[in-house]
DNA sequence: ACGACGGTTCGGTGGGGGCCGAAGCGTCCC
DNA sequence: GGGACGCTTCGGCCCCCACCGAACCGTCGT
């Protein structure tokens, strides 16, 4: 073991964080980009609060999660876009055969359908809605996927025209493909995806459904999406 | 635990494969894209042959490695581009602080320097050489990184002019950014990166150094790289 | 002030898995 | 054919860690 370099140790310890089913369930839940309390996660994962507390400690120490204490609550969320991408990347490689599982209850089936229609994936849009937007951008020549994954000059202009501020100077990749796990096709992520999603929520194009991770397109959103992208409700309903 | 869905189980079991230091060392070693024998990997990782045999069994069963038996040897390599990308993605997220470790021997230092100069990362070029090529492509407007990561039309044309066949129809992403772990900057991966690297090795622009993973630019390669990309040896030496 | 509640700490338990050496099996070489 | 070699299987060891319940600590509501 003297010959193993420290890269291997770092890689293994990073993977260890995800290599536990309970922690994996937490990370997938947190992929919606919101902050969850420790208790919510414990119930979600089906383990005792004490157990989950230890898991959160490891994930925070490992830099994957950021925490925020408010009164007697411990809110926790994915630390940053890098952490989110790590979980996304890993989840995208999970053999699809392992994913199939029929919903157990009617409520669960409804929630699943809503999630498949539209949801957030960390800080960008996913589900059929995310795919519809990505495809529309591509069809209009604003996003190019045939030789990689990047906005075109027209695309950058489009963001400006719609009134969405694009910061292309940061360390974050401007546009990235993120594999949608319900659609098995790529949707727009990165700085542009985040800006678009933020605008959609702030301008009232979309709204979160209750406390769930799913999002719904509003009437205003339908009109706007049709106007600026030529995409109709049929694409995501 | 009844509430944990099967996605979490799949994610955790996938991560488990990488979550062991010995297996991680194997995966990192195999990132050079070549096939290693079980014995080579055992010596590399510093564990008994019997131990490593079990590790290989898991990695193969998990779909990360492909094996090829030849006589009394068991050759093993990364299963496909997906597996390679998984390891790349994960390794790229390893906090750099964990990587620092001074070389122990002179031989090791020399090998490290050669690796930093140029090497393969699965099936594309990496190290200073990989960065130099990627930067040159970008500088010449053949690759665009400012709004994502994609070849331009001129870039596609360039590949044809140089005589490199580009297959953009496959399921594989045409151009991807892969974070270089010695340079901490992105280099060209994906179908285009693979085609370029294959051409470089086949046309004699580069050659592997002995049995090592490092590659060296030949005299012919120097001339060609200067002619087609305007990049001089100073960029990678 | 009190109780309810969310979260954490601690001790204990159990299971999983990484490790090795020994033995066995097939392959290659002389 | 015999011996060296590469790999695998098996048994056994041991450590690590996920888990729980009980006790404890702060915070919030009444």
Image: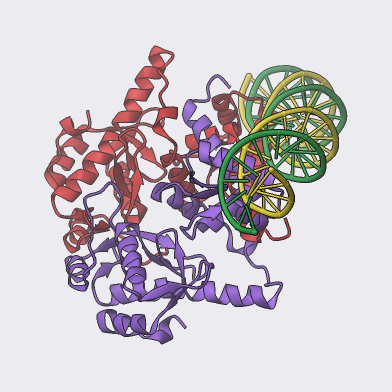
Chain colours: A purple, B red, C yellow, D green
Compared across the picture, whether C13 is left or right of B116 comes to: right
- Rendering coords of residue C22 (x, y %): 82, 20
Q: Which residue occupies 24% across, 33% down?
A: B218
- Rendering coords of residue B129 (x, y %): 26, 36
Compared across the picture, whether A215 is left or right of D13 comes to: left
Q: Which residue occupies 40% across, 24% down?
A: B100
Residue B18 appears in the figure: no
Q: Quadrant of the C terminus of chain B?
A: top left
- Above/below status of B62 relative to B7: above
- Above/below status of B54 relative to A76: above
Q: Nearer the viewer, residue A13 or A139?
A: A13
Q: Which residue occupies 67% across, 56% down?
A: A43
Residue B151 appears in the figure: yes
- Rendering coords of residue A63 (x, y %): 47, 39
Q: Nearer the viewer, residue A97 or D9?
A: A97
Figure label count: 0
- Rendering coords of residue B73 (x, y %): 61, 35
Q: Which residue occupies 26% across, 55% down?
A: B164
Compared across the picture, whether B233 is left or right of B169 comes to: left
Q: Could you say which quadrant of the image residue A108 lies in? A: bottom right
- Above/below status of B219 relative to A114: above
Q: Nearer the viewer, residue C2 or B177?
A: C2
- Above/below status of B152 relative to D10: below
Q: Quadrant of the N terminus of chain B?
A: bottom right
């Amino acid at each position: 073991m003297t010959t193993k370099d420290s890269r291997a140790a770092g890689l293994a310890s990073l993977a260890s964080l995800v290599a536990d089913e309970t922690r994996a369930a937490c990370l997938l839940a947190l992929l919606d980009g919101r902050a969850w309390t420790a208790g919510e996660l414990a119930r979600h994962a089906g383990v005792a609060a004490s157990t989950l507390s230890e898991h959160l400690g490891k994930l925070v120490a490992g830099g994957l999660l950021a925490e925020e204490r408010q009164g007697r609550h411990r809110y926790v969320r994915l630390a940053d876009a890098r952490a989110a991408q790590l979980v996304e990347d890993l989840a995208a490689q999970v053999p699809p055969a392992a994913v199939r599982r029929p919903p157990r209850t009617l409520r669960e089936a409804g929630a699943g359908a809503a999630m498949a229609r539209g949801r957030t994936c960390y800080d960008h849009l996913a589900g059929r809605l995310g795919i519809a937007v990505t495809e529309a951008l591509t069809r209009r020549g604003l996003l190019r996927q045939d030789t990689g994954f990047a906005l075109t000059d027209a695309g950058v202009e489009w963001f400006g025209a719609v009134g969405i501020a694009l910061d292309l100077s940061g360390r974050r990749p401007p546009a990235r493909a993120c594999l949608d796990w319900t659609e098995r096709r790529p949707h727009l992520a990165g700085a542009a995806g985040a800006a678009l999603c933020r605008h959609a929520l702030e301008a009232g194009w979309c709204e979160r459904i209750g406390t769930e991770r799913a999002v719904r397109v509003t009437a205003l959103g339908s009109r706007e999406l049709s106007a600026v992208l030529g995409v109709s409700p049929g694409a995501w309903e």
